[in-house]
Image (spheres, rainbow, N blue to C red):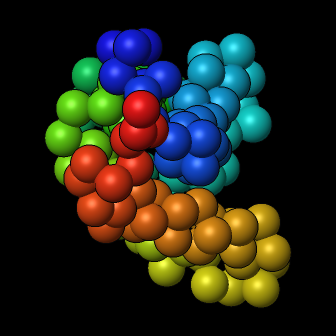
């Protein structure tokens, strides 16, 4: 995994680390501070989750950690370097959905940076294969 990563050009390494960090940090921090992240779950997602969770007495934290696992897996996949177009596009889509669900001024002032991260993910996805590798 690491040998493949270190064969990439420095700009592609930086792009991958930047996008992966944006997914790793919230996933990891939510384990230690779930109350700080629960408010970011969209109401329709928690409502749908409650259909199953309330009768089973499952906390919203389970939904938060399930999403965190997805974020963590996508970040590792992006860093691992196998078929990176797939995780990169998925990451961009997730970020655009997050932005789309938070267009009100109060929320947008927090998530506006996700547009830049999504575009960086798309840059990774559309990078020509073989061009990004160091030569020599």
41 relative position to 73: left or right? right
Q: Residue furthest front?
A: 136
Q: Quadrant of residue 36?
A: top right
Q: Nearer the viewer, residue 15 or 104?
A: 15
Which quadrant holds the N terminus? top left
50 relative position to 31: left or right? left
On the question of residue 20 being in view, the answer is yes
Q: On screen, 21 above or below 80?
A: below
119 relative position to 127: left or right? right
For image coordinates 71% across by 67% down, the residue present is 113
- On the image, the x and y values in percent for residue 108 come to 72, 77
Q: On screen, 30 above or below 107?
A: above
Which quadrant holds the C terminus? top left
Q: Nearer the viewer, residue 131 or 91?
A: 131
For image coordinates 57% across by 30% down, the residue present is 24
For image coordinates 68% across by 85% down, the residue present is 104
Q: Nearer the viewer, residue 87 or 129?
A: 129
- On the image, the x and y values in percent for residue 107 come to 73, 72
Q: On screen, 105 above or below 66?
A: below
Q: Quadrant of residue 37?
A: top right
66 relative position to 6: left or right? left
- On the image, the x and y values in percent for residue 69 come to 38, 26
Q: On screen, 23 above or below 127?
A: above
- On the image, the x and y values in percent for residue 119 come to 51, 70
For image coordinates 39% across by 14% down, the residue present is 3
On the question of residue 57 being in view, the answer is no
């Amino acid at each position: 995994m690491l040998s493949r990563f270190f064969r990439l050009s420095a700009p592609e390494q930086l792009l991958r680390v930047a996008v992966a960090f944006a997914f790793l940090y919230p996933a990891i921090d939510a384990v230690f501070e779930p109350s700080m992240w629960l408010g970011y779950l969209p109401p329709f997602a928690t409502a749908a989750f409650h259909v199953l969770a309330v009768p089973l007495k499952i906390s919203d934290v389970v939904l938060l950690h399930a999403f965190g696992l997805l974020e963590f897996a996508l970040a590792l996949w992006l860093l691992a370097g196998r078929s990176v177009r797939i995780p990169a596009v998925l990451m961009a889509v997730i970020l655009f959905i997050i932005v789309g669900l938070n267009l009100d001024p109060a929320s947008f002032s927090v998530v506006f940076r996700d547009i830049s991260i999504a575009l960086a993910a798309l840059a990774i996805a559309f990078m020509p294969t073989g061009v990004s590798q160091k030569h020599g």
